[in-house]
Image (cartoon, rainbow, N blue to C red):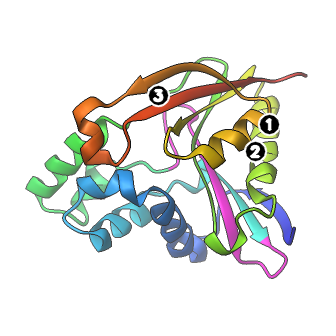
Amino acid sequence: MGTERITLGFDESERMQVGALYWEAFRRKLRPAFADSQTGLRVVQASLRSERMLVARSAAGSVSGVCGFHEDGAGAVAMTWAAMRGILSVGQALRASLVLSLLARDDEAGVLVLDGICVHHDQRGTGIGTTLLDAAEAHARERGMASVGLSVVDGNPRAKALYTRRGFVPVSTGALGVLGLVYGFDGYTVMRKALVS
């Protein structure tokens, strides 16, 4: 598979690489919040929370994938007002806050809520996603959580199939309606996997 290790967090020298990987994976739904892709990428890179990310690295040491998660009220990408104002004008930050508020996730008691799994495009299909899920489950167990949860958009059947193979089951569905035209997806499925001690 080529992945040597998974760690909690990234080195500050990897921030730009991790941010680019996250932006590439989630650009379609995040892009409407920003004037252009370059601005969105900068905000994502500035907003990354290292302590909320599991990072996979290749044997050569480069980042090959990340799995963000929510814990203690914070997710992997904390697009706070302060972070956005460091890059955006007041009006742009207000617009971004409004658009992003519809995508916000919250903690759930006893559940490690995943906040984006992404694998470098050159390394998809090599097992890195599965390895990141294993690491997320181990992280949840270490913290005494009963399950792992995530949301997957209906337009991503490959990811949904992976989660199903890994024991995740659908617990609810949702739809954005006309807002699906803005975010690039309409429906999504919330999935959960109970953890066995």
Q: Secondary structure at mark 2?
A: helix
State the residue lying farthest toward the right.
197
Identity of the amino acid at label 3? Answer: Asp
Q: Which residues are magenta?
A: 58-76
User: Which of the labelled discs sits on residue 166, or is there none?
Assistant: 1
Left or right, residue 67 beside residue 134:
left
Residue identifier under label 2: 133
C-alpha gap between disc 2 and disc 3: 19 Å
Callout 1 touching callout 2 (CB < 8 Å): yes
* 168 vs 129: above or below: above
* 107 vs 157: above or below: above
Query: Considering the image in quadrants, where does the C terminus appear?
Result: top right
Task: Please report the residue visible at 80 percent of the width from the left and 82 percent of the height from the top.
Answer: 60
Mark 1 or mark 3: which comes first in sequence?
3
Identity of the amino acid at label 2? Answer: Leu
Q: Secondary structure at mark 1?
A: loop
C-alpha gap between disc 1 and disc 2: 8 Å
C-alpha gap between disc 1 and disc 3: 23 Å
Task: Please report the residue visible at 23 percent of the width from the left and 69 percent of the height from the top.
Answer: 36
Residue identifier under label 3: 106
Q: Secondary structure at mark 3?
A: loop
Q: Position of residue 1 (x, y in %)?
A: 87, 67
